Structure formats: structure tokens, C-alpha cells
Image (cartoon, coloured by chain):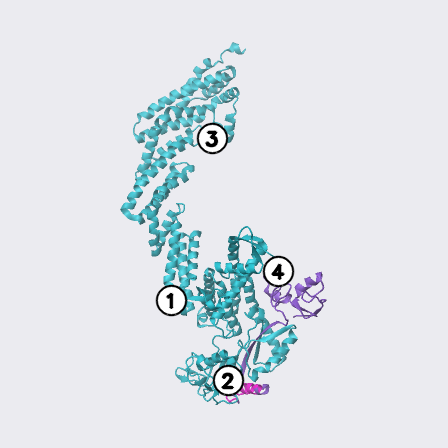
């Protein structure tokens, strides 16, 4: 289908007069998608804020700068697959090196970007 | 040696002192020797004669009294008013001048008399008196003034006062006279007072009292006359002029301390006594918009405490009734056209703001009354309303509380200004800014701001996704202005984030295109679900045309290389595109939604077929309501003379399509311009971009209420966590303070949420006092 699509595209740009094979041809598509963190829970169990939003601490500190918020407040997945705001879990592990949800030893699986 | 000289006794010296003193009193010339000798003689008598000081004082007193008696005779000879005053003043002035000089030679008396009476009162007096010229409170001066007071002033003061008041009355009636006469009398009242604690005692008890009395009597009479003869309006002018006149007169004839007393007196007589008459006049004046007269009235009434209060009520009532009748009268237009509505409102605001400025000098009390009235008008529900279910738990009962539709219309108007529309094209950038500011001004008065937020965000979403903003700079300004007027930070931050997302998407798009050269047709917007989507689980299934479907994995693959830990959800109901349609007439570029695209592409394999509704449903996999809506937009697009799709049998509403309704492409489709079919052209069939799936307005409003409930709970907990213990009244007050930038919580809702929180053991009622809540952590 790609191939066909490209053909149409080429024809219409090369030669305006020629009639395309298809009745309807795609000229442009503005697709819309929403991204969210790929985690099982919507809220961070530590600060009770949606993981999509900045954690409470970050919200309070960088009220003015909406730009940095997104960058600074990332999500962190543990080996147990539970996820929290990175800021929140970093503070948590200083007290207890266990996942707040499943009590397994906490180790970072990956950070979001 | 002293006794030998024997000439220092009082009896010996007095005869030579007496003539000099007399000369001083009558202001005759004395030469230096006489003057100095007097000093010397007083000095020596005080030193050498044990009782000298007393004797001198007594003799001096006799002498002064004798002199005063003569003066009195001279004054009394002049019987008639002006002459009396004139004579008195001449005598007084003379005497008063001498009261500064005569004491000088007798300075010695001070110390002599003082050491004997061992009183230090004169010292204290000297220190406390502000006019500390040394001659002020000397014994001799006091003696002189007291004597004058007792022997002449007491006798003539009533006549003096009467005469002075008659003069003032004459002046009030327009006759000129020598103002010095009254001023002179006043001065004598002021200076005669020997009570050093209260220098103005005599003046106040006599002159001032008489003056105030005379003033009050005069204006009680004249004011009534004016009112009766010339009516309220000219009375107002009269009162205003007279108040000023009297203030000026008081500055001339009275001591500065009397100014307030006098003006209070005038105000009482001229305004206080006629208050009901004046107040009755306010309403007609406000209704007629007579700014000048109102301004006068305001100045008059403002002098009486509480005087403007009825005026405030009148103003508020008038604005409300004028505003509402205006709205009701043009209900047909303004419910349809948000531009007209907002302009009507603004017109109203400007009119009354101008009135408040011109008539009431923007006095804060009147501004408040104006604001209260605006609030009533804006939040009024007679013309149109938004029905909100009061309680989500009682869904079956359908109780609704109507709210003003104003915020929705405001948001629509903003959209017209910010989007590329005929309106925004007509206006300059500055004009648009002014109008947006106006909207914010109106918004200030809206109680249910959360409704505005919701609609504004929806409009912004459409503008950003369809790339239809007239001016992106203005868009971002608007976000900052919303922040400035105190919209909730999390809301404003989300709006800001949306702009940021669009920029991020543009970069992403550029990278995507540069990596794979063949995707010029593709434009991707990958947005933050937290900022954009009201509900995260909203998605409509659709079977995309293969042309589109193929891009999906490619984009997802590409996105994965850019970010980790993110999942994508496609919002096909928001996406859109341009397709080229070729038929028998010509070629047309159509801007369509992805759903429309999915439907139309079904004909690509069989251009001339008639396809049934049921088959289209199978091909597109669109949910029933979406498919109906999409088809309807293709068979009955409002602006088109020739529709893109034809169908049979004909129905009037989309819900009447049944599964056997057949649709086919109109091969004769073309754009019609000036009655002629065109061979080429471009048309936008998107209409109003759909942001959510087909849901009733009811449900949308439901979610507003739901959000309010959450906000209320949140705010209650926030307050109680801080306060721990609080009375119901205080809690409600703080709650409204927190929530007022979003909505005005109803008493009922607050109560329900408190009950709920108590049930959930977040709060408890105090055992001893049912109106006190405590926080349970």
C-alpha cells in the first residue's frame, strides 16, 4: 500500500493533469497520539500524584517554570515493575531500601526519558 | 545705708511710676529715660520694700481697672452695632498691644511674687505654652487681660456677639461689611482667655457656640425655603455652594480648630435634615444617568455618615435590572451569538463603569456595588442556563441546579478571537488584545470559572491540533493573563504544557521526516496525556485505511528510539488530514477527519457502488454513534450545495439511518461558486473537531460536578490538615476562598462532602460542639 500511496503522490506532484488511479488519495495526515508512562498504576504510591504529573515536591518548587518540570520529574521502574516518581523513590530508599508496594529489595530497572 | 537713702519704699516711688504707666496704657509717647526709670524703680521697690511687689501689683490693678472703665465708657457710647464693634475693637487692639509692653518693666514682680508664694506654676506654664514669648504669661499681662475680661468684656460680650452674628448674617444675605470687625472680636475672645490649659475656652464657649447656633438657625430657615421654592435639584446646588461658602467663611472668622465643628453643623442642617428627600432623588438620577447631578449628590451625601448607603443600593439595583432587561430583550441574538453576548455585556460594563467613574469618582464603595451588580448579571440564569446535576449519587432523580451559560459563551468568544476566523481577521492585534482583556474582565465576575476553563481548554486543544491559531504569541499571552487573574496554577500549567508539547512535536516531526524521506505526508503530534486528555481511557476504535495503518508501527518504532518507558495511545478521533478526491467533474482537496477518511476510503476499491450502512460499519469498525455522526457530516454538510455522499432513503436526522440505508459517492460533486460548478477547489469538512467520543451534554456536565466534588473534598482536607480543629463557619469561609477561582461551592455540596469525609473517618464532629470539626489523620 505504501508503494501505491507513493505512486499517487509522485503522479500528482509530477503531473497535475493526469487522473490518479484512485478516487481518494491521501495528501496529508495529521496523526494524534497521547503518550503516558508505561506503568501499571496511574498514581505514584509515595506522593499520591498521578505519575503523568510532576510529583508534589516538584510542583511546589518549580511553580514558575513549566519547562523544567517535565524534564526533572521522571518516572522510575524497579525490578519489581512498580513505578514511582524518581524524586519520590530516591527519598524513600534513603530510609528503607525496599519497594513501598511489595517490600522487595529496591533496584532500579530503568528510568523514563 | 539703705535706710539712709530711705527712698526705696513703694509709697515714695509709686507717684512717679503712675504717670508713666498711664502713658503706656493710653499709648502716649514716653522717652527712653522714663522707660528705663520705670524698670529701675520697679526693681528697687521689689528689692527693698518687703511688700513692694504686692503693693505694686495692687496699685497697677487699680490703675488698669480705672483705665478700662474709661475705655468701657468710650465703647458704650457707641451704641449701635457696627459702631459698637468698631469702638470695642479699637479699644481692645490698643489694650492688647499694650499688654505686650506694659509687663516688661514689671518683670521683677514675677520673681518677687513667686518666691513668696513658692509657686512654680508660671514656670510650667511658660514651658507648656506654645507661644513661649516671655511676655505671654506674666503676672501683669494676666492681670491686664483678667481685668479686661471682668470689667468690660463680661458686660458687653453678649452685645458684641449679637452684633458680630448680625454682621455675618448680613454677609450671608449678600451685604458687604468690614470683616475686620468680626475678626477683631474673635481675636479678643481668643486672647482674653487666661486659662492656660485651654487657651480657647472663652472663645469656644461664647463665640464659637454663638456662631454655630446662628449658622444652624440661618440655614434651617433658608434651606427649607430653597427646597420649597426651587425643588430638590436646585437645593442640591444651593447646599453644595453654601457648604463651600461656609467653609471659606469659617476660615476667615473662626479659629482653625472650629472648622470641623462648623462643617458638621452645616452638613447637619443642610443635608442631614433633608436626607430622605435627597435619597429619594437618587434613583431617578441614576436611571437617567445624570452624572453631574449624581456627582453633586454623592458629594453631599458622603458628608453624612451612612449617607451614601441607600445610593449604593440604588446603583446596584439599577445595574442589575438594566443589565437583565437588556439581556432578556435581546435574548434571541445573544443566546446564539457569543460575540454579540460578550459585546452586550461589555457595553453594559463600560456604561456603568463610566457612570461610577464620572458620578462617584471611582469611590471604592461604589466600585464594590458595581461589581456586585455585574456579578448578578453575569451569573444570572433567566436568559440561558447550563443545567448541572446537583448530585451524582442521585442520578435517577435528575435534580439540577441551573448555572449561567456565560462562561461557555466567553470561552467561545475567546476562541473566535484566537482562531483564524472572519472576526479575528478583521481585527488588529491590539484590538484582539483589548477584547481578550475584556473577556478576562467579565470572567472575574463569573462564579463558575471551572466551566470556562473546561471550554477554553477544549477550544485551545482544537486550535492546536488543527493548527488554526490566528496568532501563537497571543495564545501564549492569554495563558499568562489567565495566570495573572488567579486561575488555578495546575490548570494554567497544563495549558502552558500544551504549547510546549506542540513545539516538542514539531521537532519530533522534523526528525521523523529526516530519518525516512518518504513520509512527507505524515505529520505526527505526540502529546502528553496528562496535560491534554481530560479522561485517559477515552479511545474510539476504528479500522484505519491501509494507507494510514501502515504508518502506525513505524511511528511507534521511531518514538521508542527517542523515549523509553512511554506508551502511546492513538487519538484517531482527533487526527485529520487532507485527501484528494477525483470524480467526473474535477479534482478537489478535502480536509477531513480521520473517521471521514476511513469512511470515504471504503469506496476506493469500488467507486460507483452503493454501500449499506451495515457494510460501512463492518469496514470501518466505528462505533454506531460515531459512524452516524461521520456519515451525516458527509451527506449533509451545512455549507455545501452538492454533497459528497448521497444516500437513500432520505432521513432528517442521523439516528434514523438504519442498517439498510445505502450510501454512494456523488460523482457530480463539485464546489459551486457564483452558481457555477468548479473543477478545482479545496474544502474543509472537519467542522468542529471532535475531542471526545459521542457523549451527551448531560454526561459532560456530570463530569464538571464530579470534579467539583473532588475539589471540595480536597480543599476541606487541605484546610483541616492545617487547622486540625475548626468551626463550620470558619471552614466554609476558607473553603470559598480557596475554591472561588474555580466555582462557588453550594452550601448543600459542602455539607454533603463533609458528611462523606466524616463517614470515611477523615474528619469527626467534636463531641461537645456539633459545629466544630476535627481532623483525623
Q: Classify B169 as above or below B644.
A: above
Question: Disc count in the image?
Answer: 4
x%, y% of residue B774?
Answer: 57, 54
Q: Are marks 3 and 1 in contact (CB under 8 Å)?
A: no
Q: Which residues are magenta?
A: A5-20
| Mark 3 residue element | loop
Q: Colour of chain B?
A: cyan
| Mark 4 nearby-residue class (10 Å; few <14, some 14–19, many ≥20) | few
Q: Is residue B185 left or right of residue A80?
A: left
Q: Are marks 4 and 2 on the same chain?
A: no
Between circles 2 and 1, the one closer to the viewer is 2
Q: Which residue of the protein is positioned furthest toward the front in this rendering?
A: B767
Q: Is residue B521 left or right of residue B638?
A: right
Between circles 4 and 2, the one closer to the viewer is 2
Chain letter for purple? A
| Mark 1 residue element | helix
- The residue under label 2 is B616
Chain letter of mark 4 equals A
Q: Are marks 4 and 1 on the same chain?
A: no
- The residue under label 3 is B197
Gap in angstroms between the C-alphas marked 4 and 1: 48 Å
x%, y% of residue B366?
Answer: 42, 53
- The residue under label 1 is B331
Quadrant (top left/top right/bottom left/bottom right) for the N terminus of chain B: top right
Gap in angstroms between the C-alphas marked 2 and 1: 43 Å
Q: Are marks 3 and 1 on the same chain?
A: yes
Q: Are marks 2 and 3 in contact (CB under 8 Å)?
A: no
Between circles 4 and 3, the one closer to the viewer is 4
Write the residue at 68% across / 62% down. A91
Gap in angstroms between the C-alphas marked 4 and 3: 64 Å
x%, y% of residue B720?
Answer: 57, 56
Amino acid at each position: 500500500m505504501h508503494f501505491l500511496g507513493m505512486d499517487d503522490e509522485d503522479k500528482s506532484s509530477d503531473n497535475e493533469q493526469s487522473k490518479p488511479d484512485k478516487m481518494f488519495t491521501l495528501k496529508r495526515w495529521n496523526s494524534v497520539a497521547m503518550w503516558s508512562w508505561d506503568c501499571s498504576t496511574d498514581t505514584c504510591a509515595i506522593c499520591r500524584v498521578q505519575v503523568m504529573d510532576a510529583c508534589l515536591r516538584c510542583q511546589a518548587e518549580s511553580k514558575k517554570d513549566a519547562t523544567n518540570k517535565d524534564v526533572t520529574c521522571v518516572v522510575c521502574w524497579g525490578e519489581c515493575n512498580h513505578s514511582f516518581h524518581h524524586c519520590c523513590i530516591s527519598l524513600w530508599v534513603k530510609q528503607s531500601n525496599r519497594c513501598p508496594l511489595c517490600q522487595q529489595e529496591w533496584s532500579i530497572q530503568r528510568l523514563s526519558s | 545705708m539703705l535706710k539712709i537713702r530711705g527712698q526705696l519704699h513703694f509709697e515714695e516711688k509709686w507717684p512717679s511710676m503712675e504717670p508713666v504707666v498711664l502713658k503706656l496704657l493710653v499709648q502716649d509717647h514716653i522717652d527712653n529715660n522714663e522707660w528705663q526709670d520705670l524698670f529701675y524703680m520697679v526693681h528697687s521697690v521689689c528689692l527693698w520694700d518687703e511688700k513692694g511687689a504686692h503693693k505694686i501689683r495692687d496699685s497697677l490693678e487699680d490703675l488698669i481697672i480705672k483705665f478700662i472703665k474709661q475705655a468701657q465708657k468710650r465703647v458704650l457710647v457707641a451704641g449701635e452695632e457696627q459702631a459698637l464693634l468698631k469702638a470695642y475693637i479699637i479699644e481692645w487692639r490698643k489694650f492688647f498691644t499694650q499688654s505686650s509692653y506694659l509687663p516688661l518693666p514689671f518683670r521683677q514682680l514675677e520673681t518677687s511674687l513667686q518666691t513668696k508664694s513658692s509657686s512654680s506654676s508660671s514656670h510650667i506654664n511658660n514651658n507648656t505654652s506654645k507661644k513661649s514669648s516671655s511676655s505671654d504669661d506674666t503676672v501683669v499681662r494676666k492681670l491686664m487681660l483678667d481685668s479686661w475680661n471682668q470689667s468690660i468684656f463680661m458686660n458687653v460680650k453678649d452685645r458684641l456677639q449679637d452684633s458680630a452674628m448680625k454682621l455675618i448674617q448680613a454677609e450671608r444675605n449678600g451685604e458687604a461689611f468690614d470683616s475686620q470687625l468680626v475678626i477683631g472680636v474673635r481675636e479678643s475672645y481668643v486672647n482674653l482667655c487666661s486659662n492656660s490649659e485651654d487657651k480657647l475656652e472663652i472663645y469656644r464657649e461664647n463665640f464659637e457656640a454663638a456662631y454655630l447656633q446662628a449658622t444652624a438657625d440661618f440655614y434651617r430657615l433658608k434651606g427649607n425655603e430653597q427646597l420649597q421654592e426651587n425643588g430638590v435639584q436646585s437645593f442640591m446646588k444651593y447646599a453644595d455652594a453654601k457648604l463651600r461658602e461656609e467653609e471659606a467663611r469659617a476660615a476667615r472668622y473662626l479659629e482653625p480648630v472650629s472648622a470641623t465643628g462648623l462643617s458638621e453643623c452645616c452638613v447637619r442642617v443642610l443635608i442631614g435634615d433633608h436626607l430622605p428627600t435627597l435619597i429619594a432623588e437618587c434613583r431617578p438620577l441614576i436611571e437617567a444617568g445624570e452624572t453631574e447631578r449624581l456627582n453633586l449628590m454623592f458629594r453631599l451625601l458622603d458628608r453624612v455618615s451612612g449617607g451614601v448607603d441607600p445610593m449604593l443600593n440604588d446603583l446596584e439595583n439599577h445595574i442589575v435590572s438594566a443589565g437583565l432587561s437588556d439581556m432578556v430583550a435581546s435574548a434571541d441574538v445573544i443566546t446564539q451569538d457569543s460575540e454579540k453576548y460578550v459585546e452586550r455585556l461589555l457595553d453594559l460594563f463600560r456604561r456603568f463603569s463610566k457612570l461610577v467613574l464620572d458620578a462617584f469618582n471611582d469611590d471604592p464603595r461604589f466600585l464594590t456595588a458595581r461589581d456586585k451588580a455585574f456579578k448578578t448579571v453575569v451569573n444570572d440564569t433567566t436568559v440561558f442556563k447550563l443545567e448541572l446535576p446537583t448530585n451524582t449519587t442521585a442520578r435517577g432523580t435528575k435534580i439540577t441546579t441551573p448555572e449561567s451559560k456565560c462562561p461557555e459563551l466567553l470561552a467561545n468568544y475567546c476562541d473566535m478571537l484566537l482562531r483564524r476566523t472572519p472576526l479575528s481577521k478583521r481585527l488588529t492585534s491590539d484590538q484582539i488584545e483589548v477584547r481578550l482583556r475584556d473577556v478576562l474582565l467579565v470572567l472575574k465576575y463569573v462564579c463558575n470559572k471551572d466551566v470556562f476553563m473546561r471550554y477554553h481548554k477544549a477550544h485551545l486543544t482544537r486550535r492546536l491540533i488543527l493548527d488554526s491559531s490566528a496568532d501563537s504569541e497571543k495564545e501564549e499571552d492569554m495563558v499568562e493573563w489567565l495566570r495573572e487573574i488567579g486561575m488555578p496554577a495546575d490548570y494554567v500549567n497544563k495549558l502552558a504544557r500544551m504549547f510546549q508539547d506542540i513545539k516538542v512535536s514539531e521537532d519530533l516531526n522534523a526528525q521523523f521526516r529526516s530519518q525516512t524521506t518518504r513520509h512527507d505526508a505524515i505529520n505526527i503530534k505526540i502529546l502528553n496525556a496528562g496535560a491534554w486528555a481530560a479522561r485517559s481511557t477515552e479511545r474510539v476504535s476504528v479500522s484505519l485505511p491501509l494507507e494510514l495503518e501502515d504508518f502506525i508501527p513505524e511511528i511507534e518504532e521511531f518514538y521508542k528510539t527517542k523515549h523509553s518507558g512511554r506508551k502511546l495511545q492513538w487519538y484517531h478521533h482527533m487526527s485529520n488530514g487532507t485527501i484528494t478526491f477525483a470524480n467526473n467533474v474535477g479534482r478537489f482537496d478535502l480536509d477531513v477527519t480521520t473517521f471521514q477518511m476511513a469512511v470515504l476510503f471504503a469506496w476506493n476499491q469500488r467507486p460507483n457502488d452503493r454501500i449499506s450502512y451495515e457494510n460501512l460499519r463492518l469496514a470501518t469498525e466505528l462505533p454506531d454513534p460515531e459512524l452516524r455522526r461521520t456519515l451525516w457530516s458527509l451527506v449533509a454538510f451545512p455549507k455545501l450545495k452538492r454533497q459528497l455522499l448521497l444516500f437513500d432513503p432520505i432521513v432528517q436526522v442521523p439516528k434514523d439511518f438504519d442498517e439498510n440505508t445505502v450510501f454512494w459517492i456523488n460523482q457530480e460533486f463539485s464546489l459551486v461558486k457564483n452558481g457555477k460548478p468548479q473543477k478545482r477547489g479545496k474544502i474543509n469538512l472537519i467542522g468542529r473537531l471532535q475531542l471526545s467520543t459521542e457523549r451527551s451534554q448531560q454526561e459532560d456536565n456530570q463530569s464538571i460536578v464530579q470534579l467539583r466534588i473532588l475539589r471540595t473534598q480536597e480543599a476541606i482536607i487541605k484546610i483541616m490538615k492545617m487547622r486540625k480543629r475548626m468551626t463550620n463557619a470558619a471552614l466554609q469561609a476558607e473553603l470559598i476562598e480557596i475554591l472561588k477561582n474555580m466555582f462557588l461551592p453550594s452550601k448543600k455540596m459542602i455539607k454533603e462532602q463533609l458528611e462523606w469525609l466524616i463517614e470515611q473517618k477523615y474528619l469527626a464532629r467534636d463531641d461537645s460542639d456539633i459545629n466544630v470539626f476535627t481532623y483525623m489523620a
